[in-house]
Image: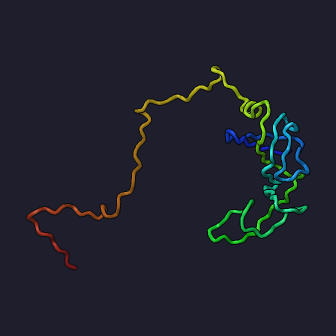
């Protein structure tokens, strides 16, 4: 099973769908494909990226048969840090295989149907399907008590006010 993420360039929206069989097995990143293989007649799509079942991204400049861990300075699968150090990251080669779990696509030419009609939300709510709202309490009952804070230490050490006219008694030991 493979997840397809189709990006509509005009609207900026992305649509997700799942296919039982991977229609892109053996195709490389960056290639143009026909959308009729998965229900988009008249659409031409470009493969912009993919990832395998473990989440490692496919890189278009890596030509190999298995995952590799090359030394990178920039690009897919690498976050650039402040010092621009080189890092080793695990990535997959650019061929889509049967273990590819997600394929990202970009629409180049549009067909008869809109993507929103094909992959849009299928749940239509009518007026009778609305769920009842939770009962609202009157504002008088909702008022919350302010949080009690501990008094600062300075307030604890406050002495009782001195009475005028009486001198302070000293305690001798």
Q: Is residue 47 above or below residue 171?
A: above
Give the side of residue 31 with respect to residue 159, left or right.
right
**Displayed quadrant of residue 14:** top right
Q: Residue furthest top?
A: 128
Quadrant in the picture for residue 40: top right
Asked if residue 158 is positioned above or below residue 128 in the image, the reply reads below
Q: What coloring was used for the rendering?
A: rainbow
Above or below 71: residue 41? above
Residue at screen point 86% across, 53% down: 28
Q: In this view, which residue lies farthest toward the bottom?
A: 173
- Across and down, in percent, residue 35 comes to 84, 39
Quarter containing the C terminus: bottom left
- Residue 48 percent coordinates (x, y): 78, 50
Q: Which of 40 and 165 is in front in this view?
A: 40
Q: Quadrant of the N terminus?
A: top right
Q: In this view, does 84 lie to the left or right of 63?
A: left
Asked whether, in this view, residue 117 is left or right of residue 28, the answer is: left
In the rendered structure, the answer to whether residue 152 lies left or right of residue 15 reads left
Residue 145, how many percent across, how many down? Answer: 41, 43
Count the marks.
0
Front-most of 58 and 114? 114
Residue at 69% in and 26% down: 124
Query: What residue do we see at 59% from left, 25% from top?
Result: 132
Residue at 85% x, 59% y: name it.
93
Q: Position of residue 133 (x, y in %)?
A: 56, 28
Hey, which residue is sitting farthest front in the picture? 109
């Amino acid at each position: 099973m493979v997840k397809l993420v189709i990006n509509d360039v005009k609207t900026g929206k992305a649509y997700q769908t799942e296919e039982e069989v991977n229609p892109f097995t053996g195709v490389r990143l960056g290639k143009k494909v026909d959308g009729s293989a998965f229900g988009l007649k008249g659409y031409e799509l470009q493969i912009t990226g993919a990832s395998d079942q473990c989440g490692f991204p496919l890189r278009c400049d890596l030509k190999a048969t298995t995952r590799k861990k090359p030394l990178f300075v920039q690009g897919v699968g690498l976050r650039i840090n402040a010092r621009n150090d080189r890092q080793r990251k695990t990535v997959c080669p650019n061929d889509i295989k049967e273990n590819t779990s997600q394929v990202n696509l970009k629409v180049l030419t549009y067909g008869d149907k809109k993507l929103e009609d094909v992959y849009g939300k299928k749940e239509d709510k009518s007026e009778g399907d609305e769920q009842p709202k939770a009962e609202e309490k009157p504002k008088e009952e909702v008022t919350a008590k302010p949080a009690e804070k501990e008094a600062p230490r300075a307030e604890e050490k406050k002495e009782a006010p001195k009475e005028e006219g009486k001198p302070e008694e000293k305690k001798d030991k």
